[in-house]
Image (cartoon, helix red, strand yellow):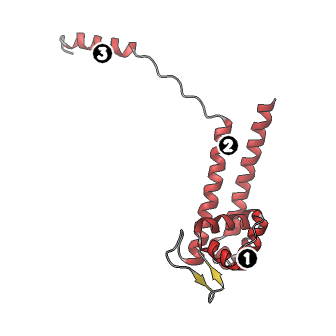
Amino acid sequence: MRPFCYPLMLVLLAIAGCTKPSAPRPALSSETAADMRVRDVEERKDEMLRELAMCESGGVGDSLQPIYGGRGAFVGRFQFTPSTVINYIKQMDGRVLSFKDAVALAHDYQQAAELAKFVIFEKDGIWNWPLCTRKLGLVQQVAEIKAFASDVFTARSSVAESVAR
């Protein structure tokens, strides 16, 4: 090393030694980790619903044109019958829909996806989509998501118990 570099190196070492070390990052709390797992469960459900919508109607999201299948008997991305929408909405939140309201809900992707999620995960109604269920292996996917969700619930319960102590 050249002699003129020594003073520069001493200055750099002094500066580096005088810097304040950064504070350690706090570890994720168990609640935060549990919240992340809940989000993962919801993302897995949403992905499965996108696959189902793609299989049923060939697309996801809202459509500029109404989507009908089965000579008009099935409506929207999830190909609900209006009577199915009416019955499950009443079970889900107590609302009583008219035929026209049921058709409108089935055409609204977000509302229809929430309804499909309720039907599949709360009412075990995957059988409402027999062809796509077989084609996509949805029975297995639903079982895996439910098992993962159960693990999340168990983890959250044990965290809540340990915090309460």
State the image coordinates of residue 80 (x, y, percent, origin top left).
67, 77
- Nearest-to-viewer mark from 3 and 1: 1
Quarter residue 102 falls in = bottom right
Figure check: 73 above or below 103: below
Give the residue type at disc 3.
Leu
Is residue 80 visible in this depiction of the protein? yes
Sequence order check, earlier mark of 3 and 1: 3
Figure check: 73 above or below 153: below
Which residue in the structure is indicated by mark 3?
12
Q: Quarter holding the C terminus? A: top right
State the image coordinates of residue 76 (x, y, percent, origin top left).
60, 76
Which residue in the structure is indicated by mark 2?
34
Q: Quarter holding the N terminus? A: top left
Sequence order check, earlier mark of 2 and 3: 3
Sequence order check, earlier mark of 2 and 1: 2
Which residue in the structure is indicated by mark 1?
84
How packed is label 3: few (under 14 Cα within 10 Å), some, or many (20 or more)?
Answer: few
Give the residue type at disc 1.
Thr
* Circle number at residue 63: none
Figure check: 54 above or below 37: below
State the image coordinates of residue 87 (x, y, percent, origin top left).
77, 73
